[in-house]
Amino acid sequence: MPRLLLLGGTREALDLAQVASGNPRLEIVSSLAGRTRAPAHIPGEVRVGGFGGAEGLARYLEAQPIDLLVDATHPFAETMAGNAAEACREAGVPRLKLLRPAWNRQAGDRWIEVDSAEQAAEALPDPARRVFLTIGQRDLQAFARHPEVWFLVRLIDPPDLPLPLARHELLLGRGPFAEADEIALLRAHRIEALVAKNSGGKLTHAKIAAARRLGLPVVMRRRPQAPPGETVETVDQALARIAARAAEHP
Ligand code: NAP
């Protein structure tokens, strides 16, 4: 029976595991980095924690052995995506990337597109003094250079360390968010600009639509380039490719 390694940490990976685990012709191991404190229940075998770089992952693929790797990590999980590509090359294991489409700028959007957290901090529109940050904990440090700005910071989990921002309020929450709620949130906090990553997908798009509705600027971090290779955009497309691979398996 083919054994599949599913690199997860996204809604798509969870949906994929839920459907694919019902396929009696497949064995699935889901892998999480271990960042989220209370991850959703994933059916089937689950492993948590890093592999030890591309080299460690290549050894894992060989030891299991794994017949197909599906990289369904977040579009900004750049290191893991690169490691997966390198490890699969080294171990001779086929790899499929599941990458949801990016959001596209629409009429009425006031996006300022940047390529890093540092550029995002530099590009904060002046004189925005109340800014909504939804970029994850790791990238907050870049905004410490703005003690004059008050930040509303939304994270999934409580942070491990105090936030490196002089003036802020912390909000905990996990999508999906509704547009009406996001509009109410932006109004209640008198937000003047947002900073977001172009994650794509529906779960967190409401804030972008809310900003458009209120005419607010969004400093939008562009995605890193995904490694070249076979890529699909939806869970259904990934399931079809996996089923085809399983059928080919001796
Ligand atoms: P990253 O920077 O690309 O990866 C850093 C290291 O974390 C990797 O080298 C690997 O450690 C480990 N790792 C990452 N994903 C893993 C997985 N699915 N299974 C096992 N180890 C994993 O990753 P990240 O951006 O911190 O993301 C971590 C996790 O959160 C991913 O599962 C991703 O899908 C999810 N996530 C990320 C974001 C985001 O904005 N970055 C948003 C939502 C969810 P080793 O080198 O030791 O193997």
Image (tube, rainbow, N blue to C red):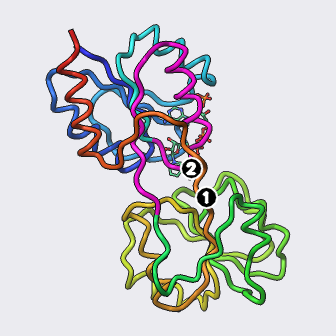
Is the N terminus in the top left, top right, bottom left or bottom right quadrant? top left
Secondary structure of the residue carrying tag 2 is: loop
Q: Which three-letter amino acid code belongs to the residue tagged 2?
A: Phe
For the point 60% across and 60% down, the residue is: 222
Q: Is residue 67 above or below residue 224?
A: above
Write down the residue under mark 2: 76
Q: Amino acid at mark 1?
A: Gly
- Label number found at residue 174: none
Q: Does mark 2 have its CB less than 8 Å from ligand 1?
A: yes
Disc 2 + disc 1, Cβ < 8 Å: yes
Q: Which residues are magenta?
A: 73-102
Magenta stretch: residue 79 in it? yes
> For this view, does 17 lie left or right of residue 36?
left
Q: Could you say which disc has been placed on residue 136 in the image?
A: 1
Q: Is residue 78 left or right of residue 20?
A: right
Image quadrant in which you'd find residue 239: top left
For the residues labelled 2 and 1, the Cα–Cα distance comes to 11 Å
Tell which tag, 2 or 1, sits nearer the viewer.
2
Some atom of ligand 1 lies within 8 Å of the CB belonging to the residue at label 1: yes
Percent of width and height locating residue 157: 54, 56
| Residue 59, position as x, y percentages in the image | 54, 12
Q: Residue at x 44, y 62 (%)?
A: 174
Figure quadrant of the C terminus? top left
Find numbered disc 1 in the image and state the secondary structure of the residue it sits on.
Answer: loop
Tell me if mark 1 has few (under 14), some (14-19) or many (20+) residues whose alpha carbon lies within 10 angstroms of its own: some
Residue 8: x and y in percent read: 43, 39
For marks 2 and 1, the one nearer the N-term is 2
